């Protein structure tokens, strides 16, 4: 399975303008629309909204943010935007391809 | 074809099945594996997170999530009946 698999998937989310919540390893949750994702799964978010502005007041005014991939714990994706069947068959194909 | 040749095949056989994941910082996840890669990055659907912090157990129902693989300690398919922890 190539690591580009998830990059391609996130590119699809960018095209469909899906709003996601990125949860970092330190517990900070940032909601926004992904505008860019690279090989290392670093993200760019526009209009990021912090889940707990009381704790992180310095982040309220952000217009744009770059999130380093290694600090990400989860990316919450809305269940209806997941495209579960497509992903499952794509993943099975990738595994098969790699075995050959 | 359906033989367990390498460790990651556990994940291969668990696609579209329930799995249990133990992560760093006393976090446990259960959910349906949708896809994964060699870094153990995964997409889990209908996930449920249990975290144990300072003796307090908190459960969170999450939607679908992409999970970065670097925090993972162990993965186990739930199909063969792992007891709930």
Image (cartoon, rainbow, N blue to C red):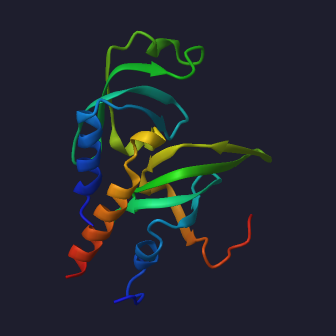
Q: Position of residue A58 (x, y in %)?
A: 47, 13
Q: Position of residue B41 (x, y in %)?
A: 39, 57
Residue that lies at the very extreme toward the right in this rendered image: B55
Relative to B67, is B60 above or below? above
For the point 45% across and 51% down, the residue is B67
Relative to A27, is B83 above or below? below
For the point 44% across and 76% down, the residue is B13
For the point 28% across and 62% down, the residue is A90
For the point 57% across and 55% down, the residue is B24
Q: Position of residue B72 (x, y in %)?
A: 50, 60
Between residue B63 and residue A80, name the one nearer to us: A80
Q: Quadrant of the C terminus of chain A?
A: bottom left
**Visible residue check, residue A75:** no
Between residue A18 and residue A100, name the one nearer to us: A18
Between residue A55 and residue B76, name the one nearer to us: B76
Horizontal side, residue B33 vs residue B18: left or right: left
Q: Quadrant of the N terminus of chain A?
A: bottom left
Q: Position of residue A88 (x, y in %)?
A: 37, 62
Relative to B76, is A43 above or below? above
- Picture quadrant where residue B79 is located: bottom right
**Visible residue check, residue A95:** yes
Horizontal side, residue B33 vs residue B23: left or right: left
Relative to B28, is A15 above or below? above
């Amino acid at each position: 399975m190539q690591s580009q698999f998830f990059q391609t998937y996130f590119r699809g989310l960018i095209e469909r303008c899906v709003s996601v919540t990125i949860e970092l390893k330190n517990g900070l949750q940032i909601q926004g629309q992904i505008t860019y994702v690279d090989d290392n799964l670093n993200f760019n978010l526009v209009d990021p909204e912090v889940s707990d502005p009381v704790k992180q007041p310095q982040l309220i005014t952000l217009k744009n943010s770059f999130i380093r991939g290694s600090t990400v714990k989860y990316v919450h994706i809305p269940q209806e935007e997941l495209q579960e069947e497509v992903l499952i068959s794509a993943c099975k194909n990738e595994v098969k391809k790699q075995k050959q | 074809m359906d033989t367990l040749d390498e460790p990651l095949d556990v994940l291969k056989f668990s696609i579209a099945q329930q799995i249990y994941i133990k992560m760093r910082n006393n976090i446990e996840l259960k959910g349906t594996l949708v896809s994964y890669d060699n870094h153990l990055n995964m997409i889990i659907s209908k996930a449920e997170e249990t975290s144990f912090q300072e003796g307090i157990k908190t459960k969170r129902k999450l939607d679908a999530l992409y999970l970065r693989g670097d925090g993972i300690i162990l993965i186990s398919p739930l199909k063969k009946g792992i007891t709930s922890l």
